[in-house]
Image: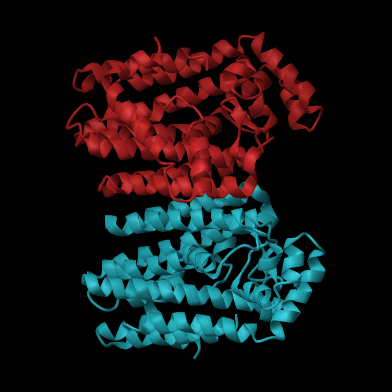
Chain colours: A red, B cyan
């Protein structure tokens, strides 16, 4: 199923969110306006705003509150990407040059800060202090998770547990923010808030596992960045972890993390993973999480958004970009 | 007058704020805890928390609300410094190595993000959405001001007006946040909120002008960083501006910004400014702002905090570090 069919129940409102996101760049300071324009036209699937809107559909749907929240979640995501690309020294994202590549570290760090602030301002404009606290806590989780990832770069001694914990911080936390905030802002009862939060969490984990698989099996064109980027950064993802489990004595990931021939070992790792059962094994783990995501959805009111959340879980696991 | 005498009316509560700030580093993740510890022991005069507490003393003083706000303002300041040092590639602050110097760009950017988030979380814990919005807006102003500063680096075509605008964004905005939030959280009437906001604004401008003077007339030991650091970054401050006004045809700042001999021209600029009337002229401008800061204070209730604010303005202009 295409993503554009899935979000049908919130299509119109999503279009408004997208339009308002573009208008963020309308500021007096021309240079800042250009930086924002460039960043906002980058692409991305807008999955987080979709989650935010769909999660708000079960009780008192209030678009006036949900819109700034959905924008805030997407902008937080964008700001983290701008900072990530800067510290990873990445040149390409979504098939385009990164802000860092085009305008340097200084502009990229400050632009990220500006967008974080704008995200905070939008969240506060909902008038609901609970979602503001959720945003702050999420950003604390994301940045401490990224600090952990950087700290553990090129370290083979990481467990599956620590992997899940890491992607929970870096990805699932923001999915959670979208679904939980949608529930909170529509005055959902406590149990439903929990169900939607758990959905966001498990969906986020599955999404990141698939992202980590695609980093090995996708093409550069599909990925919008080089294949094997995670390994190049020393990020030990599930496929690479399974490869070292399968060949504990000697394998390209071990050699790479031991500072041996970078390009050569990335290429060999990509080949080894593609030609083994590892891809399948990783998809199986991701599927466990999407199954868990949908487990309790039927306790929510039955409507088109509930079906959309189920379809979205299916999309997450079958997507190829 | 010593700073420690000035904040007497809020001494006990300031000690509690300082203690709680140190306890921010108590997190489970040991490495993050060490990073926070290092950053929080850096020094600084804690002028922003002092302003926050004093400004809350005129109506319903509620330390439970003021404490997290004061912490939030100080942490926002700290996070901006960590990012600034990173993008300026500065090695030393407060006489110690910067986070960036010790642990690299990656850790410094992410630590700054974490501290921004913690600041947001603390501000939200006041339960007052108005001060959360003020914080977000302030951070937007600061970061867009820094983007402007970076964009205009090594550009001689800047006016006094654009200088004041720049330091208003980068420094006065956070002073404002402290004083306005103090007023808001103590349920001050509208007129008093404005008086305290204007006080913070004008004090912040004066503070930054003095900072910019000290960058030329201080010693490396007093400054905790090299003399002439602003010029080295291409930041065109008031003393440098006056030097080019005095000698429009040829001067060391013009030569430096034209990419001629860096060290030599910084040294010559420092000498030229120290041995002229420029220092005095700059202090006169700063004094105009402290006078403006205090202008309407007498409309506030008469108490020891009001006198402290007057004394603080005096301290700001006479301080030598």
- The residue shown at (37%, 20%) is A292
Say if residue B61 shows up in the picture. Answer: no
Residue farthest to the front?
B249
- The residue shown at (49%, 13%) is A284
Q: Quadrant of residue B296?
A: bottom left
Q: Quadrant of residue B270?
A: bottom right
Q: Position of residue A33 (x, y in %)?
A: 48, 44
Residue farthest to the bottom?
B1
Give the camera-side residue of A187 and A20. Answer: A20
Figure disc tally: 0
Q: Quadrant of residue B224?
A: bottom right
Say if residue A55 shows up in the picture. Answer: yes
Q: Position of residue B258 (x, y in %)?
A: 75, 60
Give the camera-side residue of A162 and A294. Answer: A294
Q: Quadrant of the N terminus of chain A?
A: top left
Q: Position of residue A145 (x, y in %)?
A: 52, 41
Q: Is residue A274 left or right of residue A74?
A: right
Q: Is residue B98 left or right of residue B300?
A: right
Q: Is residue A118 left or right of residue B218?
A: left
Give the camera-side residue of A79 and A152. Answer: A79
State whether residue B172 is above or below residue B104.
Answer: below
State whether residue A121 is above or below residue A160.
Answer: below
Give the camera-side residue of B210 and A297. Answer: B210
- The residue shown at (47%, 53%) is B116
State whether residue B205 is above or below residue A70.
Answer: below
Q: Position of residue A289 (x, y in %)?
A: 42, 21
């Amino acid at each position: 199923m295409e993503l554009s069919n899935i979000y049908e129940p919130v299509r119109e409102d999503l279009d408004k969110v997208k339009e308002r996101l573009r208008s963020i760049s309308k500021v007096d300071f021309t240079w800042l306006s250009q930086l924002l324009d460039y960043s906002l036209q980058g692409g991305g699937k807008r999955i987080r705003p979709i989650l935010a809107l769909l999660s708000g559909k079960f009780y008192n749907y209030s678009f006036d509150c949900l819109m700034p929240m959905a924008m805030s979640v997407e902008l937080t995501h964008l700001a983290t990407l701008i900072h990530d690309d800067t510290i990873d020294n990445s040149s390409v994202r979504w098939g385009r040059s990164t802000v860092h590549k085009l305008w340097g570290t200084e502009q990229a760090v400050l632009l990220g800060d500006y967008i974080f602030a704008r995200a905070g301002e939008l969240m506060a404009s909902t008038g609901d202090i609970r979602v503001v606290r959720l945003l702050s806590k999420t950003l604390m989780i994301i940045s401490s998770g990224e600090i952990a990832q950087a700290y553990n770069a090129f370290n083979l001694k990481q467990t599956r547990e620590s992997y899940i914990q890491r992607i929970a911080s870096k990805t699932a936390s923001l999915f959670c923010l979208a679904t939980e905030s949608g529930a909170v802002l529509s005055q959902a009862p406590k149990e439903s808030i929990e169900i939607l939060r758990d959905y966001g969490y498990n969906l986020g984990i599955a999404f990141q596992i698939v992202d980590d698989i695609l980093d090995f099996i996708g093409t550069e064109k599909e990925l919008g960045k080089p294949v094997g980027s995670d390994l190049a950064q020393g990020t030990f993802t599930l496929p690479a972890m399974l490869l070292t489990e399968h060949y504990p004595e000697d394998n390209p990931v071990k050699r790479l993390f031991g500072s041996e021939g970078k390009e050569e070992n990335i290429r060999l790792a990509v080949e080894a993973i593609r030609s083994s059962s590892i891809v399948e094994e990783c998809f199986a783990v991701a599927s466990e999480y999407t199954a868990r995501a949908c487990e309790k959805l039927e306790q929510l009111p039955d409507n088109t958004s509930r079906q959309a959340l189920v379809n979205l879980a299916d999309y997450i696991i079958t997507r190829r970009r």
